[in-house]
Amino acid sequence: MKTLLLSLFVAFFGLASPVRAEPVVVVNAASSIGPLSQDEIINIFLGRYRRLPTGDAAQPIDQPESSALRAEFYRKLVNKDVNEINAYWSRLIFSGRTSPPLQAASVAEVTVQLLARPGAIAYVERAQVDKRLRIIMEFPR
Amino acid sequence: MTARPDLPPVSWWSSGLLLRSTLAVVLASLLAAAVAVGYTAYATSVRAHHASQTRLNELLDTIQSTLSVACFANDQTLAVEVAQGVLSNSDVLAVRIATTQAVLADKQRGGAPSAQPAGLLKRLIYSPFDRQKEVGHILLTPDPQVIEARIREEVWFAAIQLSWQLGMVTFAMVVITLMFVVRPIKAMSDRLHRMDPTTGERLATPKRHASTEIGQLVTDINALSDRLTSALEVERHLRQQGEIDEKRYHTIFDNAESGLFLIDRQGSLMSWNPSFAQLFDIDRQPPGKALAPLNINQLPWQNPTLMDRLMHSALTQNTAVTQELQILMPGAERSWAHMVLRSVGNNLLQGVVHDVSHLKESEASARQQAITDPLTGLANRLGLEQRLHMLVQAYAGATTRGFALLLINLDEFRRVNEGIGLPAGDTILQTTTRRLSACVSSQDTLARLAADNFGIILNNVTQGEAVERIAGRILQAIRQPYFADGSPINLHASIGVALFPGDGFDVPSLLRQAELAMESAKSSGGDQHVFFNPVLTEAAEQRRHMESDLRSAIRNHEFVLFYQPVVDLVNQRLAGAEALIRWRHPTRGLVMPDSFIPLAEKTGLVIEMSLLMLDVACRQLLDWKNRGLDYVLSLNVSGRQIPDGLTPAKLQEVVQHYGISPTRLALEITEGVMLRDVDKSLQWLKAVHDLGFRVYLDDFGTGYSSLSYLKLFPVDTLKVDKSFVQDMCDDNNENTLVGAIIAMGRSLGLDIVAEGVELKSHLVALQRMGCHYAQGYYFSRPVPAEEFDAAASRITALLAAPDTGA
């Protein structure tokens, strides 16, 4: 029953949302990181390469785990849902060679971390992009 | 039928059938198994490889997502982990995982790297987020040993399974063969061994085999038994029939009257029948082994070489040969055997022998009879001839000096015999035999050739004087009076003599010579003997010539009639003529009847001649009749023509043919003719007389001139013999005699014709005695027909002349 209620809630919430989330990949506006392709974004966020084409180490930051944006992001990026992404990472975590993106505790923290860490790359709701941030990749509409 | 012990025992375990079928099944099974196992190995190999591939692919499918993650993330740890997992699969020998940049893991089992075995399995790894993007690959090396082991295992399993199945099939096969084939056959075989089909025993159809081939076989065997049994039955019947036949033949053999025997080519007797044994006084049964074999040559043949020769010719000629053999059996009647020998093949001869002693005896007696005269017991003509032949041969052998042959004939015996009857005649002949026997010696031969013909051979008599003496004795003996019927009869004999070797040198001519001599004696009056001399032969020869001349004369019409006029003295005119036969011989000229009539009578030719002359005479009468002349023609009739040579019917036929009155034809006969057979002659005379023919009695006065006969016979005219007429003189005896005849004739109402009137005085005397008719040279000689008219004129003139003085 609880699950049902939650589902209903989520559904209601989702439906009730007037606009679907529209994630864009951003970096610190001051960062030298230039625009990146979607493949480069995939490699970075899914642990294939942690280095930017510039050679700098890249630090991907994830939205909170339950955020809709996160789901929307991965759905758009690799067309996977959150569970699949989690499963993916669960296999890699086992070897310990690669780690998943840094998990922000909240949306705000994403911005904090983004600004605080060099080479950080994150994704935010388009509407949240401000002058401190610079979009380096947008999903085609 | 009992089981034959020499048959091999039939037992199912050693049955060739079972063993063979089992072997065949096993062999076929092994072959099938080999093929099946081979195929199984092949199929299993293919399947195992395929299964291995499938499993590995499935394995790869299983690890694919993890691998794509590892390769995507270049996570060597994860790759190694996966490789370890893969290697845990027994099929995998080695695994190698590589990204596009580097090898993440390269692991293999046992550490012994194999040199690139075939069947490597490679699969490309794509990014988990982009199915198009290749991020690495995995290379699997399957382990062939594992696959082979699996194949071996499967093949082994298949082999085991097949062996089991084949074993079961073989067992089933053996059991079925044993149950359904071998045992029924064995049972049938055992039954057949004990079975006796002749008693009707038959094979029973084994259970559940009524419609199988075994059942069919049983049916066939039973049918065969039936046929064999019936064939045996037929054979037994035939054998019985054969035994019966043999018994029958045996009966014939045993009871045959003829002696039957079988000999080999050496003449040893192999078998014979009781008749044979009886014929030769030998054991009845053929000799057993203990007895010595009997040879046909040991039988008591008079001439054993004949028997040898007969056997030889029977063996070589291959046909039946016969021979009459004389047997020497002391004290036994049988003396002759008739033997038939025939080769019957295998160098055996079959013989038939009859006792022909009786036949021989009767043959001998018949031969004796053939040469014996039954009346007198003397030799007959044949016997005499045999004896003559014997003596002729004996002369050649110088055992005789020669002999004389006498033929004796009783003169006038025939007439005497007719007079006194045959039994008396026989008595005379028997008496004659006794008398003749008394005249000859024991070494001479006496024979009776025919009725009163006897023959005597005087052996070793060659001298005429000796013969003369004996012949005289014989004549003397015959002259003695015979007494038959109580009255004495006087006979005499004629004897002809021929001498050997003086006269003839062979039997027929000797007989002929003696006969000629005898005939000569007889014709000279009889009661005498005549020695043969060549003149007799010549005379006989002449007669023979004459006879053939006569025959040709008849054929050539050399006989003619001459006519001697007969004058009617009372009416002084020509009354007719006597027809006289003449022979116009081509070389001898005119031949008078005296020279040929006796021979013609003897040979019977006279009958044919007389018929011809009858024809001629009738033609002459017809001629006269046509010319108005009423002459009577008289024709001489010989004794040989009465009664059958010139039958009354024939006479009538001829005169009717010419249209002549029978009264114009007179038939002249002599007394002797009538006396030959009085009854028949009388009958004939009466017949012709009744037909109207006139009958003249010729030569009257020379014979018996029996007055009773004159009364008895229907005679119209007497012809006085010319001897009386010519001897007539005035006042003498003859004169008176002729006168008496004439007177007697007239008193009997008979006409008289005087013959031989030659002189005027004869005529005068006859006229004076009242004779009615006359003929003679005084009037005319016999003349041919063409001169008759001239003679008639002359006679008329003679009669008319007033001075007919002598």
Image (cartoon, coloured by chain):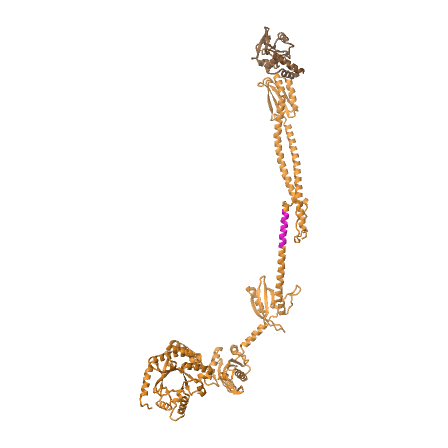
Report which quarter residue B761 is drawn in: bottom left
Is B20 placed left or right of B550 in the picture? right
Is B356 placed left or right of B775 in the picture? right
Front residue (pair B308, B426): B426
Residue B574 appears in the rendering: yes
Locate the N terminus of chain A by quadrant: top right
Residue B102 in the image, given as x and y percentages of width and height:
60, 18
Is B724 placed left or right of A58 in the picture? left
In the image, farthest residue toward the top: A131
Locate the C terminus of chain A by quadrant: top right
Is B736 placed left or right of B4 in the picture? left
Front residue (pair B441, B570): B570
Determine the main secondary structure of the stretch shown in magenta.
helix
- Chain B on-screen colour: orange
Q: Is residue B20 above or below residue B454?
A: above
Residue B514 in the image, given as x and y percentages of width and height:
48, 81
Q: Is residue A84 above or below residue B218?
A: above
Q: Is residue B627 within the magenta segment?
A: no
Report which quarter residue B27 is drawn in: top right
Residue B533 in the image, given as x and y percentages of width and height:
45, 82
Name the residue rendered at 32%, 87% in the picture: B799
Looking at the image, how many numbered discs can be counted on the residues?
0
Residue B149 in the image, given as x and y percentages of width and height:
65, 29
Residue A50 appears in the rendering: no
- Chain A on-screen colour: brown
What's the magenta region? B216-231
